[in-house]
Amino acid sequence: MRGLPSLAALAMATVPALWAGAAPVHAAELVMVEARGCPWCVKWHRDLGAIYPKTAEGKRLPLRVVRLENLPADLRFIKNLRYAPTFVAIACGREVGRITGYNGDDMFWGELSTITKRLTPAC
C-alpha cells in the first residue's frame, strides 16, 4: 500500500480547502431584536425579510435575528432594549447605530442608510 497517502497527509491537504470554503467572518452585522408576539416584527419580516440579504446594506451588515427575552451572551453589551423590533448595527464589537421600531420600509431604509455611512471599512 505504498501509493496511498497517510491519514496525516490527507488531513493536511483537506484543512486549507475547508478554510477556503468557510463562511466569511463579518466585522459588522445588523442585529434585529424581536419579541414574542410582536406584530411589527412580523410586518418587517413580511415586507423586507426576503429582500434584505440581497441588498448592498444586507451584504455589508448581514442580519442576525435574536429574541429580546433570550439575548445571547455575546450581545449583552447592548443596553436599553425596550421596544421590538430594535435594529442594532454592530461593527468591531460595538454599537454604531440603532433603529427603534418599524414604521415601514421608507423609514427603515432611510435610517439604515444614515448608519451605514458611519461605518468604517475595517476595525
Image: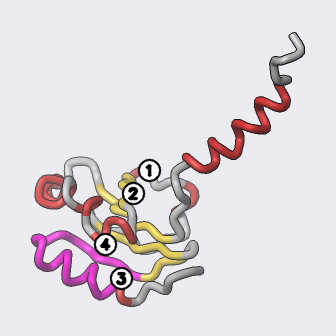
Q: Earlier in the sequence, mark 3 or mark 2?
A: 2
Q: Position of residue 76 (x, y in %)?
A: 53, 64
Disc 3 element: helix
Q: Which residue is drawn at the image coordinates 35% and 82% (left, top)?
A: 116
Identify the mark at residue 64; answer none if there is no mark: 2
For marks 4 and 2 on the same chain, the one whose residue lies earlier in the sequence: 4
Numbered range of the magenta stretch: 97-115
User: Residue 22 at x, y = what percent?
Assistant: 56, 48
Q: Identify the residue position indicated by label 4 in the image.
A: 57
Label 3, residues with CA under 10 Å away: few <14, some 14-19, many ≥20:
some
CA distance for labels 3 and 2: 16 Å
Q: Is residue 73 above or below residue 61?
A: above
- Mark nearer the N terminus (1 vs 4): 4
Q: Residue flagged by tag 4: what amino acid is it?
A: Glu
Give the amino acid at mark 1.
Asn
> Label 3 sits on what residue type?
Thr
Residue 17 in picture, x, y percent from top left: 64, 43
The quadrant holding residue 113 is bottom left
Reply yes or no: does residue 102 show up in magenta: yes
Q: Is residue 63 left or right of residue 46?
A: right
Which residue appears at 39% of the width and 81% of the height?
Answer: 97
Judged from the image, the secondary structure of the residue bearing numbered disc 4 is: helix
- Relative to 81, is 104 on the left or the right? left
Colouring scheme, one of rainbow, by chain, secondary structure, one colour: secondary structure
Q: Where does the image place residue 98, in percent across and percent down from the top left? A: 35, 78
Residue 70 is tagged as 1
Precedes in sequence: disc 1 or disc 3: 1
